Amino acid sequence: MPNIKSAKKRVEITEKKTLRNRRVKSQVKSAIKSFEVALNNQDIENAEQKLQQVKKTIDKAVSKGVIHKNTAARKKSRFTAKLKNIAS
């Protein structure tokens, strides 16, 4: 445990940010999971809606600094390609 006041504050801030990051990552993973379930069920219309939700949650995670922007772009591109392959 830190003894200096500023170090104690840093520990508190780190805990808060860790919880927020964990929550945001969980939301992204949940959105991805629901999209993949819709894809596996061959439900194209539902999958398209879920894809929009995935893109939205990924963009929010990027804006909060939880996910790197290139990682987000790669994920969105791959999910769009998956949907396109199944739809055709």
Image: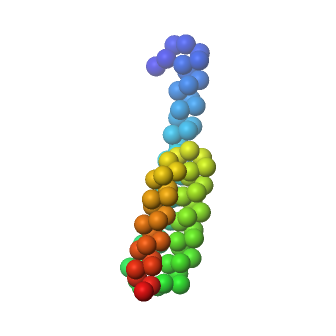
Q: Is residue 81 left or right of residue 11?
A: left
Q: Is residue 37 left or right of residue 53?
A: left
Residue drawn where x is 57% and y is 37% of the image: 16
Whether residue 38 is visible here, answered yes or no, is no
Report the front residue among 88 and 62.
88
Q: Quadrant of residue 39?
A: bottom left
Report the front residue among 14 and 47.
47
- The color scheme shown is rainbow
Image x and y of residue 67, in percent: 50, 49
Name the image quarter holding the C terminus: bottom left
Image x and y of residue 9, in percent: 59, 23
Image x and y of residue 33, in percent: 44, 67
Residue drawn where x is 55% and y is 38% of the image: 17
Considering every residue shown, the one lying at the far top of the view is: 4
Whether residue 43 is visible here, answered yes or no, is yes
Q: Is residue 48 above or below residue 75?
A: below
Report the front residue among 61 and 87.
87
Q: How many marks?
A: 0
Q: Quadrant of residue 7?
A: top right
Image x and y of residue 41, in percent: 40, 83
Q: Quadrant of residue 37?
A: bottom left
Q: Is residue 20 above or below residue 1?
A: below
Residue drawn where x is 50% and y is 48% of the image: 68
Residue drawn where x is 53% and y is 65% of the image: 54
